[in-house]
Amino acid sequence: MQYQSQSVAKLYFVAAIGLFVGQILFGLILGLQYVIGDFLFPAIPFNVARMVHTNLLIVWLLFGFMGAAYYLVPEEAERELFSPGLAKLLFWVFLIAGALTVLGYLLVPYSSLADLTGNDLLPTMGREFLEQPTITKLGIVVVALGFLFNIGMTILSGRKTVVNLVLLIGLVGLAVLFLFSFYNPDNLVNDKYYWWWVVHLWVEGVWELILGSILAFVLIKTTGVDREVIEKWLYVIIAMTLITGIVGTGHHYYWIGTPEYWQWWGSVFSAMEPIPFFMMTVFAFNMVNRRRRNHPNQAAVLWALGTAVMAFLGAGVWGFLHTLAPVNYYTHGSQITAAHGHMAFYGAYVMVVLTIISYAMPMMRGRQAANSNRSQVLEMWSFWLMTVSIVFITLFLTGAGILQVYLQRFSENPMPFMMVQEKISLFYWLREIAGLVFLVGLVLYVASFFVGSKDPEVAVEQAASPTA
Amino acid sequence: MRQLNPLERQGEALRYPPGDLAVWIFILAELSVFAIFFAAYAFTRMQHVALFDQYQATLDRTSALYNTLALITASYFVVRAVAAIRENRAAQSRNWLWAGVGMGLLFLVIKGAEYAHHFAEGVRLSTNTFYMFYLSLTFFHFMHVILGIIVLAVLAVRTGQGHYDAASHTDIESGASYWHMVDLVWLILFPLVYVMH
């Protein structure tokens, strides 16, 4: 760690991991509710568990992104963070607002929460993923503005690098697009139309810039490959991301009442969305093969490569699976979507946050560059357990989805929704088992922070000769 | 022995592909998007031949022909720019690049006039399937011409500032390759959308 102020990232990373655990626990509750419908009812109904599961995911990823920015921006800009105090203050504001919101979901009925928080003054609640009370949304905007100010001032008065620039564009885009969560037109078509400007343009637009820049930063640090080479890749990857991803929003506009040309635009452009992810995979492996040194933190390198592969599979391949309009006509809103959602979020965003945590955390906890061997081995175990179980979750949900689409929408005599749910319950059970394995992986991951902390660090090997 | 042109003279020392590998991957990706769009056009046309023929007749082929010439000329200028920098003639290279930018701008003006004409007649994306494809394909290409012009202009400025010479000009080769891609796409788009029926 080169600058003292980078250490504010630690708070954010710890909170991110804590909320990650919460997200997984609610995921397990939710997964069980698919097969045991009244599990924990009425304390935690299905809709509440789902809301908490998805909202916690988004919030902890935001914590992760902010932590990543606080860590890498000063190092790239070659100066201390503009205001570490502001970063700490905003951390607590965000954490408390997030905690209160989740408690609100859990403790009072959703409609009471709406009344309590004055939703009628500026109604924004009640929409998937944007369920947060208006007041929480305002809080998010305040935190985002303060955060961008802090990061922006650091970048503006420091060394300007492509990594910082791309990250900043991504973060500004994230904040600006979030403003559409306040736009809640009465017309349901318009409502959905702009809702996707937050949801889609986040995950298939600006978040990919954040992902790309974090990955590029870690690869620069761990491989020692020339910055110029990595920056060039970053440029073409984000260009392709934006070309395909922005118009690719159209794959959500097939059946919501928007003009027909979206079926063409959405199909053609989103069919190309795997390309930037594929480029990212080629890029990551290329850089690691051309490495000029073997970085002692092999766990971080593993996470980085894992991100590139799993993002391509989850976001790219599983997205392509149901993105063409004629296919999506049958598959939209089925378990195919859930399969894609799980692997894409894990592969792209969960893994990139865990990558930067894996890279940065040892140094913020006083290590030279990496954790002890025991700690890294445990972390790698957690990598494989979580990654393999997400693959199985995805496969089981895909199986469930194919069967669901066939029985409910494709066969000669389509069956009603709930009957189909019973028919596919075996897949839900298997998914739940895979989810439990994921939890084991997560527990090992958390444990890896506490294991072998007295052991010596893995030696810094300054081997100048690349193996490839 | 006949005089070798600059491209041939350095032929042996040239790396293939010229320019940056990452840019080539980008170009291939872009070509794939267009290829899918062209295929979609062709297959849809097969199902609506009469409709496509009827509305294709409303397109301005003369303008499109001028535009084809503009892009080919721009590509020629860009070739000259690469040849010049390989001989260390930076000032000439810069001028050729600006000439390429000029031809690109000419394309935008002509195409803009075409759009103005169609929009004035009330043509929209939802008017019919042919116009949907016509507007989508040409506008997507139009955006690429703009990007290509920006690339050439940046290269021209940087060449003028002395950033490149015979030994180091990968950026110019990369930009030139990108521009040729923009040209190539139009050379498919023009006959496919304007002429063939």
Image (spheres, coloured by chain):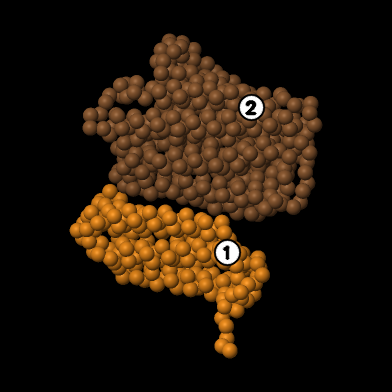
Give the class, few, some or many, for how many residues have Cα within 10 Å of label 2's Cα (few <14, many ≥20): many
At 57% from the left edge and 64% from the top edge, which residue is drawn? B19
The reply, left or right, for residue A156 in relation to residue B126 is right
Examine the rendered structure and indicate whether residue B183 appears above or below residue A386: below
Residue sitting nearer the eye, A98 or A18: A18
Residue at image position (28%, 32%) is A409
Q: Chain of mark 2?
A: A
Q: Which mark is residue B19?
A: 1
- The picture places residue A239, in percent across and down from the top left corner, at 51, 51
Q: Residue, x 65% and y 47% (percent of image)?
A: A288
Query: What label sits on residue A102 in the rendered view?
Result: none
In terms of depth relative to the viewer, which is nearer, B24 or B62? B24
Chain A on-screen colour: brown
| Marks 2,1: beta carbons within 8 A | no
Q: The residue tagged with tag 1: helix, strand or loop?
A: loop
Badge 2 is on which residue? A445
Colour-to-chain, orange: B
Amino acid type at circle 2 is Tyr
Q: Is residue A383 visible?
A: yes
Element under disc 2: helix
